[in-house]
Image (spheres, helix red, strand yellow):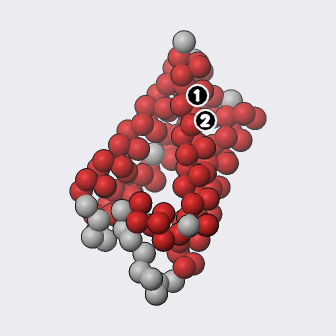
Amino acid sequence: MFTGIAFGLAVILNLFIAFIGWRFLFQPMPAAAGYGVAAKADGDPAYLTIKGMRDLTYGILGLALLFFVGMRAEAWYMLVVAILPLGDVFIVLRNGGTKAVAFGIHFATAVVVLLSSALLFIASA
């Protein structure tokens, strides 16, 4: 039972982060607003592109680990990757974003990623 749930949640999370990366690459201003810190119209677009490439790459890497290495490797990956949304909480708060976005989106994401990691560890045992 845990195997299907763990595998499915991992796929969904990896596809979601890849989609976020794609959105930052092709719709950077709305993506930044959704992140919780709106980008300045005259700001440097390179930073939004970096964010997009980072997230797209992490999503694809997660899928590759899951499909080519296995659930245990994905479990460790998810455990480490949970650092990113936790860091995003502080980035949003430090740069004028709301607590609702920081905790409601980024902290909640970290919790779901950690839950995914735990399920993957259980399913791969």
23 displayed left or right of 113: right
Q: Residue at x 46, y 39 (%)?
A: 113
Query: Looking at this rendering, what residue extends furthest in the bottom direction?
Result: 42
For the residues bearing labels 1 and 2, Cβ distance under 8 angstroms:
yes
Amino acid type indicated by mark 2: Val
Residue 83 got which mark? none
Amino acid type indicated by mark 1: Gly
Residue 76 to residue 48: above or below: above
Front residue of 84 and 76 = 84
**Relative image position of residue 28 (x, y in whole percent):** 53, 69
**Relative image position of residue 115 (x, y in whole percent):** 43, 31
Question: Is residue 50 at least partly visible in the picture?
Answer: no
Where disc 1 sits, the SS reads: helix
Q: Picture quarter containing residue 45? A: bottom right
Using the numbered discs, state the Cα–Cα distance from disc 1 to disc 2 in whole angstroms.
5 Å
Q: Assess disc 1: are there few (<14), some (14-19) or many (≥20) residues with their C-alpha within 10 Å of its C-alpha.
A: few
Q: Residue at x 47, y 28 (%)?
A: 118
Name the quadrant of the N terminus: top right
**Relative image position of residue 124 (x, y in whole percent):** 60, 21
Q: Which residue is mark 1?
A: 8
Front residue of 15 and 113 = 15
Q: Which residue is mark 2?
A: 11
62 displayed left or right of 112: right
